[in-house]
Image: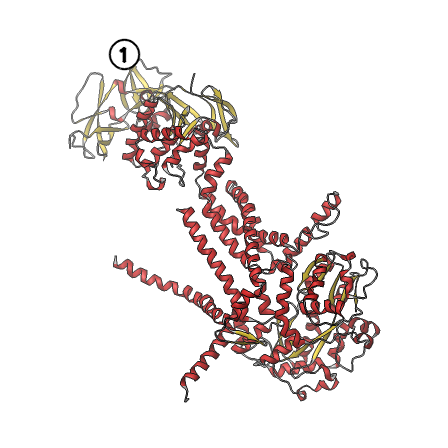
Amino acid sequence: MTDKGNFSSKLSRRTVLKSAAGAGAALATPYFFVKAHAASDPKVVRMYNYDGTLGEFYDKHWYEPFAEKFDVKMDFIRLKGSRAPLEKIQAQIANGQPETDVFPLHPDQLIFARRNKIAMEIPRSAIPEYENIYDEFITEFGPCLVLWSYGLAYNTELVDPAPTSWKALWDPKYAGKVALNEGLKDQTLQMVNLAFKGSPYPVDEETFKHLSDIRPHLVALWSSGADAEQLFRNGEIVMSPFWNGRVTKLKSEGLPLAFAVPDEGFFVRHSVYGVPLNAANPEMGIEWINFVCGEERQKRMVEFGYGTPNKLVEHTPEQAKAVIVADPEVVKKAVPEDFTKILDNSAAWTDMWNKWKSS
Amino acid sequence: MSTVELRKVEKRYGSVAAVHSLDLAIEPGEFVTLLGPSGCGKSTTLRMVAGFVQPNAGTIEIGGKDVTGIPPHRREVGLVFQNYALFPHMSVYKNVEFGLKMRGVDPSERRSRVEEALGLVKLGDYSERMPAQLSGGQQQRVALARALVIRPNVLLLDEPFGALDKQLRDHMRIELRDLQRKLNISTMFVTHDQDEALSMSDRIVVMSEGTVCQVGGPNAIYEKPNSRFVADFMGRSNLFEARQVDESNDARTLDAEGLLLNADKTQELNGGNAIVMVRPEKIELLESETNRDGSVTVGGKIMSSVYLGSTVQYEVKVEDGPTVLVVRQNVEDGSISAQPGSPVFLSIPHNAVYIIPQ
Amino acid sequence: MSQTQGGNSKAWWLLSPGVGLYILTFFIPLAMLLVLSFAKFENSVTTIGFFFDNYVKIMTDGITLTIFYRTVQLALMITVSCLVLGYPVAVLMRRSGPRARLWLLFFIVSPLLTSIIVRNVAWVLILGRSGIINDTLIDWGWISTPLPLMYNTFGVVLAVVHVYLSFMVLPLFGALIAIDSSIEEAASSLGASPLRVFLTVTLPLSLPGVTAGCTLVFILSMGIYLTPVIMGGNFVLTLPMLITDSVRNLYNWPVASAMALMLLAAIGAMVLLSARVQKMVGG
């Protein structure tokens, strides 16, 4: 207490930061107040869940069996889109308690979480099931699960021959019948580079020149999987970059759709399941992560159409085809992505992207 | 040639006839009042002349031209509403100028005519004011100037004084009537106020339930109503069921609900029964029994008296007869010690007894 | 007299919950927004301080200002469209009987009762490549390839107008119904044709409603975010979309705060302008 001025300025700075971030989050979501300050109850585990069939899958195969086995209640918050709202979670952590006990992190979000220290480090010993998980799928915050592939979805009746290159999107034959992904614009930019430069980086003027070439062909830029599904269903588009799970789902509905892995390469991503800092019930959160890493839960995920890092899970030929990443020959085509670069450049790329859209 | 002529004009709303087979003519320079209770069809008639309401049958002529089916803006009528209906976003000058502008009158003539019209209603100094800055009477004068400036064939006035207080209303009556005479403009005036009708009109058209009850000068309408309705509507009156009980050379003696009255024999009596009217201001109130020529005198008792300032109104119960309404001028304070309960005598002149034709 | 004053001072206390709510939900967050807008966001980490980086970025990045202007443009287009489409509806409502008026009101307000998702599906059915309009026009042989009716500015304006029309029609109707119809009749009897009655009397007297409706729709339109995403196929960019993107995908609260304040300032300017116009046309 020798330097009183310094102390008080430190205090006020912290207070301002905390409350400012909190107020921002409060503006965005009124229910935050209720959720964030709910009393912690060891019998309740709070989770995010998705819309649509993936959400149903989680309910049925990842949440209900766990609730039954451990006699706990699972509480859900629906996600809008596929990403956990880190901007909100960060503000909640700064102000007290995050709204869930487990959160999925996309690879770039993992780096953001690391830098902002908003996820709990989980020692390997805390998750016995790690024994059967491939090493490269284990991070200090949790396991990489739900392996999904990002390739080219196309209408098998209207696109002929079947596309083998991302360049098929630029084919004038399909002008006015294709769309690109706005939601994951980093992937779109890397895709353009793959198609014309052979490697995903750098994102530069040339990348956008190719985007400008395709611009007149585009029906829309979609921002969520549901939007893209809608475009395919309505016949608005015949081809778009997409992920395998949604294609499997649309196929099962009878749509003539197929998923192509282009020769230039494709993308494989995953979600790291971690426990946010200050979570109300971290013990049960870790328990759940361990539970879903197990063979039984991972088998279900493969049946659903997404890949697994669990060594014990075996694939039927059909499952292997659907999850894409079960075939070592195909996996070779997966393009290594630099997520630090993606995170650090996202602002600059967004500006370039918006300029391109507005030009 | 009449300025306005309505022939067999009919207006129905659904199955209800608002105006039923109406014939009416307004002569050049004539001031005609449509008088009646609300819902009698007087306003509908005026609105048909103005062109806002289309008749279901019949024809309307203005200035000798058939205007049935012609929209309002092509009928040369000047219209004044009860609520003035001035354009609130325009100055007094602009309000009055409006009709001339619509007619494409050139600006210099417009100016002189607007000034003339504002002079007529004594508002020459107010031309730059906005309507909201004027009193009700001033606003109504602007409305009048605005209607007159276009030199319409006919001036239509729809209860124009309804929103003014009594004193102003009396004043405006005189002013309007003077102006109308001066300009010699045919006028159709709609009101439910019989005082207004009586004081201003050349002719009054009394209407009820979509039909004309009586047409005539103010005097005829007041003194000689042709129906019980008109008698009742045109001010206070004593109406009695009566039958003839005796007859002399020049008079009939009538038993009016127990009150014996003499009436001039010039009045026809169809059958034995009639309704007779005695205006309450024509009955004299006496302290003692005094017989006068040409009058009957009966005794009674004052039931109530109402002090109305310039007049006092009494209810007098006639012995073995009806209750009679009497109105006396308040000429001297306490001329009659007319406390309720005090005995009085009524003197009713023969010529005050009017037999309503059946 | 003193009693009246006593009553008034007591009545002021009744305002305190409302004022408190405003302080809590508006002024405090606004102050925080101001603080955050001067913070720095670097390497994914936010530092509170007094930096002008965010404002400099907005002014110099060559895109935020462009999008801001486009947002204003879009809001103006929506406002004018609402006015042009809404005025006849308001006139019709005024002339209708109470029953018909209620039905019209229901039709105008009904888009507010449906979710944006449902409305979007409906628009695809109508405006899409194989929607009702394109199919019909192709069937009739008027066009050979489908018209681009959505996933562009047209689609966004149409979808937003559909919802915000009620915010234009209601103030317009309020202004129109307040006009004494005898004023229009007076004009008519003075020789004005129906068109001239409208231009010289009805329209000028409804200007307060026009101002109110335009202000309301403009302010609402400055905040559109979801409709351009869905109906514009993401090609139509607005400032609110940029703000959302900055927060949700870039986690950059500071720059988003600066942009939000810019939007707020624009809306504030519009409100002031509207108040002045209102004073002019009203008095």
Residue C34 coordinates in the image, percent (x, y): 47, 69
Q: Is residue C23 visible?
A: yes
In the picture, the quarter occupied by the C terminus of chain B is top left
Using the image as rendered, state which of residue A162 and residue A279 is in the foreground: A162
Residue B37 coordinates in the image, percent (x, y): 39, 31
Q: Secondary structure at mark 1?
A: loop
Q: Quadrant of residue A107?
A: bottom right
Residue at the image position 32 percent from the left and 60 percent from the top: C8
Q: Quadrant of residue B27?
A: top left
Residue at the image position 19 percent from the left and 30 percent from the top: B330
In the picture, the quarter occupied by the N terminus of chain B is top left
Q: Amino acid at mark 1?
A: Asp
Q: Is residue A4 left or right of residue A207?
A: left
Residue at the image position 68 percent from the left and 61 percent from the top: A221
Q: Is residue B161 visible?
A: no
Say which residue label 1 marks. B250
- Is residue B163 shown above or below C86? above
Residue A34 coordinates in the image, percent (x, y): 53, 72
Q: Residue furthest top?
A: B249
